[in-house]
Image (cartoon, grey):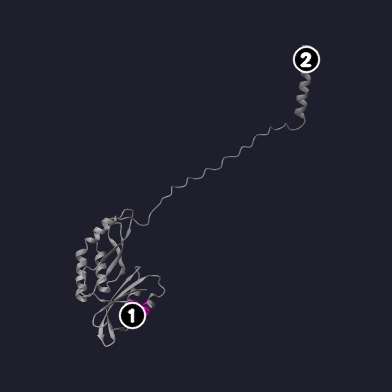
Amino acid sequence: MPNAFKLAILGSMQVVLASGCGGEPPVAKMAQVEAPPPARPKAPAMQMTSELGFIDPAATKKAFRALDAEFDHCEEQAVRKLAVLSGELKFFVRVSAAGQAKYAYLIESTVGDRDVEECFVNVVERATFPKPQGGEAEVTYRTNLKASPARPATEWTADRVAHLVQRARNCKDGSSARYQVTMYVGPQGGRNGKVLSVGVAASETDSDARVTCIMHAVRSGGVPTPGSWPAKVTFEL
């Protein structure tokens, strides 16, 4: 081997040895790769539920029409009690998933007789309705007394009994519910009249105590005479 080549190899070895003896070997820098974030748990699919189910309006109407015979019985009692009795009723019914009325009440009524109104409500509470789709359902239905008196009661405006309206309003006792009151007034003699009948409809279910108060307030106040024929007046609280 030529001397020049030996010297070249020897020199290379010395360089390598010298770099190895002179401290820590250089550390190659590695690219820092961030670890992927932990996988988030998959959110459950949003479930949309409806509080109320659905009843076909046509089927609901048919269910109410099936009550006509019982409604007629209530009406016959009403007419025997007061010949001029007339008016409309609007029911609110909560129907269970099984198709039964959980509760029912009148949210509007211009019939003007509490006993007759309760007769109608009792019929509806015993009724069977189509089973709602998707849970309990709420339905409303409007009907009216079929009988049309030969001579209807004289219509009064609420100002004729303004003092009774105020007395009845005190019964609300801060309630936000709406009450519809209808009353009939008959002659008693002289300038005095008398309350013949009173009916009350309420916009909520838990109104029995306030309804009782309203009926007492209306019945216990004096009224002017309507003359020789009964008068009818409806007002809201």
- The percent coordinates of residue 117 (x first, y second) are 26, 71
Q: Is residue 130 visible?
A: no
Residue 92, by quadrant, is bottom left
Q: x%, y% of residue 205? A: 34, 68
* Residue at 76% over, 18% down: 9
Q: Nearer the viewer, residue 45 or 92?
A: 92
- On the question of residue 116 being in view, the answer is yes
Q: Which residue is mark 2?
A: 5
User: As displayed, is residue 28 above or below residue 12?
Assistant: below
Query: What's drawn in magenta, residue-wise?
Result: 157-168
Question: Which secondary structure class fits the magenta region best?
Answer: helix
Name the kind of residue labelled 2 in the image.
Phe
Question: What residue did someone put label 1 on?
Answer: 160
Report if the CB atoms under discs 1 and 2 are less than 8 Å apart.
Answer: no
Q: Residues within 10 Å of mark 1 (few under 14, many from 20)?
A: few
Residue 160 found in image quarter? bottom left
The disc at residue 62 is: none
Q: Amino acid at mark 1?
A: Arg
Q: Quadrant of the N terminus?
A: top right
Q: Quadrant of residue 74?
A: bottom left
Q: Secondary structure at mark 1?
A: helix
Query: Observer-nearest residue: 180 or 135?
Result: 180
